[in-house]
Amino acid sequence: MSLPSSELRASVTSRRGVIGTGAGLAVGALAGGAAYGLMREEMPAAHPAGPAVPDGQVPFRGVHQAGIVTPAQDRMHFVALDVITEDGEQLRALLTAWTLAAERMTYGAEAVPGGSVGGGPYRVPADTGEALDLPPSNLTITIGYGPSLFDRFGLAHRKPAGLRELPGFRGDDLDPAACGGDIAIQACADDPQVAVHAVRNLIRLGFGVVAGRWSQLGFGRTSSTSTSQATPRNLFGFKDGTANIKAEDAAALARHVWVAAEDVPGAAEWMTGGSYLVARRIRMHIEVWDRTHLQEQQDVIGRGKLAGEPLGQKAEFDAINFSAKRTDGEPAIPLASHVRLAHADNLDGIKLLRRGYNFTDGSDGQGHLNAGLFFIAFMRDAHAQFVPMQRALAARDLLNEYIEHTGSAVFACPPGLSESQDWGAQLFG
Ligand code: HEM
């Protein structure tokens, strides 16, 4: 993959540098090639030698989308959108405009040339401005498409067979207002303002074409996706992500995360190299948990709280031994503990790449924090991986006493873009 050099990068209208003089992009002017050309104008050319990416930037283009196996940042803004136009051309043009805006923002540029003030005093600013002065902050923008999108716009034949709504699970308490969506945008960054700015400006570009359905802010990643990262902790205080698939494990990624050509024959072949994203908003009843004694907490998870070791072992990355016994002869890792039920050995080899975030969304009006885990996982087949795993957990996980699934969605995330590609052409073909 070729990457823009830091020199070329410096020539882009940077949020922190000189504000460009290009005319702002009128929201209504999305359709047609003119808008694309205008936005592409200030993009850095591809650098044939593929030099190192400047610190604080994650390449936008590549074989796979950024934001899946690239190291998880600490902040996230996730939004699910409904497409409100009936005109497929408008949607296609928006996806094209989004590609360029997303790419610009990951370099630290304003969403479109002209940005916040370059259009002059009598134009509406083309960038909302709250990320001016902020560095790229490792921003990644990942797009996904929901099953409902393919019922319209002549896209039925492009729908991957694996993109189907998830079934209900035992114990679900889903709020319809926090479920589904035609399009998902996951923006992750080291700075929450950069992530929020990215989502806001993409929605702004889509005025009249898309409308926000639900969104979620996340702080504190709950998973490591690379062996270079220390394992973070979730709001129950436990290390989360120890046994996750890591970016360095190419064989596991090919087997469990990336959609292969044989999975998506025919016109759905565009999904090859993509991944399915399952999002579950999981409320955690932290007040109940916080009154639970340590041994009970550890038995629920199946790991120690301090080091994160599998119960019966010593260190975090020691192999799990499900046959280990306590001194009283009981299994060291209880039969209904979370890690025992979710472990590949007990699920015919199934694994997922987890990439979730903690959240607190105010209080619930009954004296409790509305807090939890915004579970995000990427996988090759949601119905062959997430569904059986969640069924096993929903049936008997000891954790169920302390959690409640309140939101749910599944999206097909296409593969990454080559230098000449954009999301519109990729989806519509
Ligand atoms: C609020 C809800 C949840 C909490 C607090 C939670 C917490 C944890 C913790 C602390 C671990 C052990 C560390 C690790 O290996 O990552 C773990 C492991 C795991 N969790 Fe969860 N989890 C939650 C929901 C889920 C859901 C919904 C799924 C999938 C349907 C899931 C799948 C897994 C898997 C696959 C593992 C690794 C098991 C292994 O191979 O050892 N978790 N989780």
Image (cartoon, helix red, strand yellow):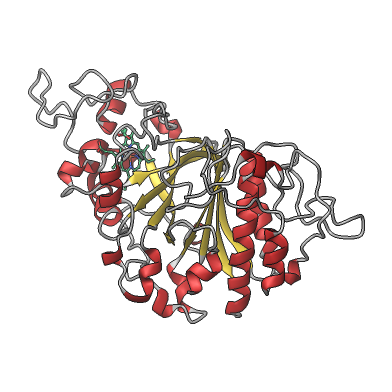
- Tell me if residue 337 can be seen: no
Q: Count the labels in the image.
A: 0
Of residue 304 and residue 156, the one placed in the foreground of this image is 156
User: Does 381 sit left or right of 223 as displayed?
Assistant: left
The residue furthest left is 329
Residue 76: quadrant of the picture? top right
Above/below status of 49 relative to 231? below
What residue appears at the point 51 percent right and 44 percent down from the top-left corner? 50
Q: Quadrant holding ligand 1?
A: top left
The residue furthest front is 49
Residue 306 placed where, x, y %?
Answer: 34, 19
Residue 73 placed where, x, y %?
Answer: 51, 37
What residue appears at the point 43 percent right and 69 percent down from the top-left corner? 147
- Tell me if residue 223 can be seen: yes
What residue appears at the point 16 percent right and 36 percent down from the top-left corner? 335
Residue 55 placed where, x, y %?
Answer: 57, 33
Residue 217: quadrant of the picture? top right
User: Does 86 sit left or right of 117 as displayed?
Assistant: left
User: Does 346 sit left or right of 80 as displayed?
Assistant: left
User: Does 114 sit left or right of 121 as displayed?
Assistant: left
Above/below status of 132 relative to 309? below
Residue 273: quadrant of the picture? bottom left
Residue 376 placed where, x, y %?
Answer: 42, 48
Above/below status of 331 relative to 203? above
Above/below status of 230 relative to 410? above
